[in-house]
Image (cartoon, rainbow, N blue to C red):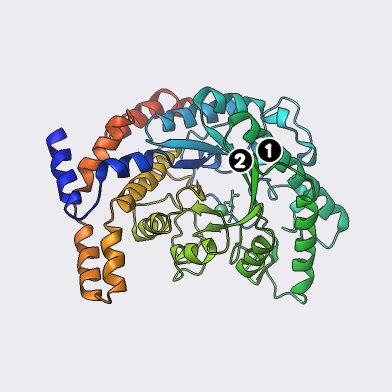
């Protein structure tokens, strides 16, 4: 095994790449694992069906039914994933026997999550939940023409931001509070400006509440369209990119790679954003023909995203989260596969001979640029990955699946 690693190290060194450095670099990147893959975005409120133009499909048995089960599942998955982690929470995952209305949520309703994070030395991120609620029955929240509805969701976002600030204070890792709203229309609207003007005003009012940006940073997440909301989405890419640019001291734009036209590459956008912003945020997902939120695969899109993060020297500037919800396969496996794939893609990207590639481009030697990019694909990556997993005490190969199968037999299959 270690002989393999030595050979791989030499092969990469020939191209000016230091594999030891790459392993060190990947192990310091925190990946935020989305709690909502564990229960199909259901949450603990029993607020009814998932709404807001998003959908989890499939009926694989064993979804977590409460906080205890969800935490146990997350723990199990974490044991099979190398690298630093955060847990990405949504407001509907508040834990308390007596849950208040969403607008009245307090840090204490997330106390078990804070304990969970402290025990494991990980961070927490936060998302207000502006869907699956009677107050968002028509998928209008921060853009609603009804001032009472708008006020309600403004208060909810302020509450979540304070909770995120608390997460940051407690864990010592800055928490990202990400706002995504479903707001839009199925029918062609008669007024495109009005909802966006109301959205801008709502955001201004949310962010007027002062929090400490050492503990919490904000992101806003654009989208092309949602199911049943095909004709208009208030929170478009232009809207949020401009909003974030104007408030760049604490707001960043979050790019979800399922939220753009399928021929657009999200990775091409990082360099443009990073020339004008200190931070970017990502939701890594896999869209199959639409924003289907399939489990992240080690495909060209993921490799492109990770490569670009490394090339832009953005690993320290990016809040990287995963965002998918596949209910058709074992949910713990879904987490493990997606998270391991992002780790693999990051390591792969860190092993790229980027100095050489840059040089060829600047010299106009596109033949060499292309030739090397192709050779790179078959460099001995696996021994480096194996070494990283060994160092992190997680299985390097498919044997992780045996553990998940056993967990399914012993734990998940007992849930009705
Ligand atoms: C929806 C957005 C959003 C959600 C989560 C659950 O299209 O991607 O990020 O997936 O908030
Ligand atoms: Zn998303």
Q: Position of residue 317 (x, y in %)?
A: 51, 50
Q: Categorize mark 2 by other alpha carbons within 10 Å: few (<14), some (14-19), many (20+).
A: many
Real-space CA distance between mark 1 and mark 2, rounded to the nearest whole angstrom:
7 Å
Q: Secondary structure at mark 2?
A: strand
Q: Position of residue 59 (x, y in %)?
A: 49, 43
Where is residue 198 drawn, in percent x and y? 79, 64
Would you place residue 175 above or below residue 195 in this image?
A: above
At 35% across and 56% down in the image, what residue appears? Answer: 303
Residue at image position (50%, 60%) is 258
Do the residues under discs 1 and 2 have CB atoms within 8 angstroms?
yes
Name which of mark 1 and mark 2 comes first in the sequence.
1
With respect to residue 114, does 40 lie above or below?
Answer: below
Kindly tell me whether residue 395 is visible in this rendering: no
Mark 1, residue position? 165
| Residue located at (47% from left, 28% from top) | 75
The residue carrying pointer 1 sits among few (fewer than 14), some (14 to 19) or many (20 or more) residues within 10 Å by Cα, namely many
Q: Position of residue 304 (x, y in %)?
A: 37, 60
- Residue 26 sits in quarter: top left
Q: Image quarter for residue 143?
A: bottom right
Quadrant of the image containing the N terminus: top left
Residue 17 drawn above or below residue 112: below
Instruction: Choose between 255 and 292: the one closer to the eye.
Output: 255
- Observer-nearest of 369 and 332: 369
**Front-most of 34 and 138?**
34
**Residue where numbered disc 2 is placed:** 175
């Amino acid at each position: 095994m270690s002989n393999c690693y030595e050979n791989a190290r030499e092969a990469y060194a020939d191209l000016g790449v230091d594999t030891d450095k790459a392993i060190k670099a990947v192990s310091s990147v925190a990946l935020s694992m989305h709690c909502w893959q564990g229960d199909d975005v259901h949450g603990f409120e029993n607020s009814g069906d998932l709404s807001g133009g998003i959908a989890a499909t499939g009926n694989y048995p064993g979804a977590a039914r409460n906080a205890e089960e969800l935490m146990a599942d997350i723990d199990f998955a974490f044991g099979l994933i190398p690298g630093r982690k955060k847990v990405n929470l949504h407001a509907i995952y508040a834990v308390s026997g007596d849950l208040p209305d969403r607008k009245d949520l307090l840090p204490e309703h997330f106390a078990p999550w804070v304990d969970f994070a402290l025990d494991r030395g990980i961070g927490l991120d936060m998302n207000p939940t502006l869907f699956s609620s009677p107050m968002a029955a028509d998928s209008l929240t921060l853009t609603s023409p009804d001032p009472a509805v708008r006020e309600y969701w403004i208060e909810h976002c302020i509450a979540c931001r304070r909770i995120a600030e608390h997460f940051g204070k407690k864990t010592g890792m800055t928490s990202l509070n990400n706002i995504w709203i479903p707001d839009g229309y199925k029918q062609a609207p008669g007024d495109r400006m009005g909802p966006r003007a109301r959205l801008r005003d709502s955001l201004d009012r949310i962010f007027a509440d002062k929090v400490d940006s050492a503990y919490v940073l904000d992101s806003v997440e654009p989208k092309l369209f949602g199911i049943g909301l095909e004709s208009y989405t208030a929170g478009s890419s232009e809207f949020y990119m401009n909003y974030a640019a104007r408030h760049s001291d604490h707001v960043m734009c979050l790019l979800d790679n399922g939220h753009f036209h399928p021929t657009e590459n999200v990775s091409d956008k990082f360099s443009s954003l990073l020339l004008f912003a200190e931070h970017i945020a990502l939701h890594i997902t896999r869209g199959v023909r639409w924003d289907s939120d399939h489990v992240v695969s080690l495909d060209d899109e993921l490799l492109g995203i990770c490569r670009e993060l490394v090339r832009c020297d953005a690993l320290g500037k990016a809040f990287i989260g995963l965002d998918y919800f596949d209910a058709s396969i074992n949910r713990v496996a879904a987490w493990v596969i997606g998270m391991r794939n992002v780790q693999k893609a990051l390591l792969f990207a860190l092993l790229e001979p980027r100095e050489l590639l840059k040089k060829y481009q600047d010299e106009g030697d596109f033949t060499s640029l292309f030739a090397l990019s192709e050779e790179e694909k078959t460099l001995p990556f696996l021994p480096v990955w194996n070494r990283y997993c060994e160092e992190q005490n997680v299985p390097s190969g498919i044997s992780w699946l045996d553990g998940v199968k056993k967990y399914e037999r012993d734990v998940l299959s007992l849930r009705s």
